[in-house]
Image: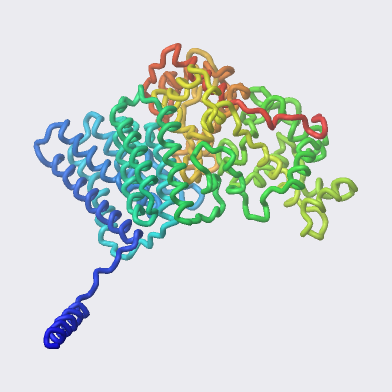
Amino acid sequence: MKTNQIFFILFFATGLLFSFITPTPVRSTTDKVESYYREGLDSTYMALQAFSNTLGALATPKERLAAFYEARQQYKQIELLLEYYQPHLARSINGPALPYADGESSKDIIPPAGFQVIEEMLQAPNVTVYTLIAYNDQLISIFRQLIQNEDPVGFQDKWVFDAMRLEVYRIIALGISGYDSPVLLHSMPEAAAALTSIRQVLAMYDPVIASDEMVTARDTLFNKAVQYLHTHSNFNRFDRLHFITNFANPISRMLLTWQNKLGIVIEPERRILLPTAPHLFATSYYQPNGYTPSAASDPTPEKVALGKLLFADARLSGDGSRSCASCHKPELAFTDGLTKSPALDGIHTVTRNTPTLLNVGFQSKLFYDSRANFIEDQVFAVVHNTAEMNGSLQQAAAIFQKDTVYRQLFQSAFPADKGPLSTEQITNALASYLRSLTSLNSRFDQYMNGDSTALTPREQKGFNLFMGKAKCGTCHFAPLFNGVAPPYFAEPESEVLGVPATRARHAALDTDAGKYHLYPISIFKYAFKTPSVRNSMLTAPYMHNGVFTSMKQVINFYNKGGGAGLHTAPENQTLPEDKLRLSGREKRALIAFLGALNDTAQAGTLSAPAP
């Protein structure tokens, strides 16, 4: 009995003791992500401080370069979270080493800053240590402020998974292409650091996923991907096609599998690439609705059918002699094959070359000078342009109102609108048709989605050149190959190339000031929006003025450093002036790859012949 009493007292005392001990709370996965992020901020800050120390000391150029590499690789370890949660800082941290101006809301020119500026200066002559320290101090200041901000970031599982997959897209489009490291070309080690960070964040979900098989598969794939980047670090020889198809795309698909297994749903919102896409090159998941003014403006089959009729209707022009299809011929990939289209008066020409309309729905700005935000705005501008159509949408609406067939089609396309036909209905119907002109099923697309026989060896080499040595992919971003960069597909790039007025031996710079006409800001002078090179083998002549009649001429122009090589470059040329030094074989491979981007499935006959 006494023994039982002693046991009871000891048991009670032990329980009482443990009741006063606060149990260690179980940390949520997002708490772990928050800690990882904050530790990464600290590590980057300290690496920047260390780099600054090499600038102030008697360090060798090699030691300074090593410290710089370390600082940016520390940044790459948190890039997926910093870019996602602090996108407004992206340009200041690792944006292009070019001045920036918005134009629309401000005419101020923002000087370049960040890692890329320092990278360029490390290789430039006559740059003082004090200048380097000043630019590095700007970065240190940014990270100091981020560290001092103790407010919780508010990580959620769905946003973390979204950030991881977008980082894979960023690695493909901006990392291994050299966009992030255009001078030092330290792209593969930095891509390896970014991939490692994705793996580290994903590993925080191991206890939740509770699948040894999935964890092992994850580790195997990431190990192979990182090893490939480290053992194939030569920028010009790196096989990007192999890396994307064997590592980047499978990693993206794996992340989606984990996300689905965990029951994490990411709302589609109004994105160009749906979050349910297995990888960046899953072209069937791209939707032009991301660039419509509103959900009410989204295409419907009825709007598209109506817009297709309107596209071929010459009554949109002032004298009834010209339709949209007069200059955008479906059989010519929706161009006209001319240097510049004839003006409506039959004497002059319009100011610029006619661009293709295929994939126009994937452009966030329209016209060569980016002056239109929506296709509806572009339609309105073209119809009312005196040289192009000299029409009136208001008058056209009145004409179509009297047409029984059209009236019924408009009622079917816009059932909620009970009033008379409007200009807004016409522009939206035409815009809906143009958004339907999706051309994303080329042989290249088929290859990236599983058909390993779709590309020839020369075309495969051409893609690797496009994304590497030739530097095409730093302006024409994969996979849309236009100037709108993944992963956000936001603002289109505009470039100053120094395009000549003619192909004469001593040609002058073309006088078209481009975007400067819209926004008189010095850096916009001679700037033009970067177009898509999809179907480009079908859309000669090239450039805003149609000066080049073949793709061979275009590649030779870039191979010489653009206008700099022809002595037509303005002071603000944004295209790197260095010669690419492409061989004849490499040029032919590039042209072969561009041919593999042809997809004219949309170039069928219209419902009515164009005048």
Q: Residue at x 49, y 34 (%)?
A: 478
- Left or right: residue 160 compared with residue 129: right
Above or below for 460 versus 426: above
- Left or right: residue 286 compared with residue 66: right
Above or below for 314 versus 287: above
Please state, as top left, top right, bottom left or bottom right, where the N terminus lies in the image: bottom left
Give the x, y percent position of residue 108.
Answer: 42, 48
* Front residue of this view, candidates 191 and 119: 191
Residue 353 seen by the camera: yes
What scheme was used to colour the molecule? rainbow
Q: Which residue is drawn at 14% across and 40% down?
A: 54
* Front residue of this view, candidates 157 and 4: 4
Please state, as top left, top right, bottom left or bottom right, where the C terminus lies in the image: top right
* Front residue of this view, candidates 148 and 497: 148
Give the x, y percent position of residue 218.
Answer: 37, 42
Quadrant hosting residue 180: top left
- Left or right: residue 72 compared with residue 395: left
Give the x, y percent position of residue 588.
Answer: 49, 14
Given the current orientation, which residue lies at the most extreme front position?
1
Quadrant hosting residue 4: bottom left
Given the current orientation, which residue lies at the most extreme left position?
58
Above or below for 220 versus 204: above
Q: Residue at x 73, y 25 (%)?
A: 347
Tell how many labels.
Answer: 0
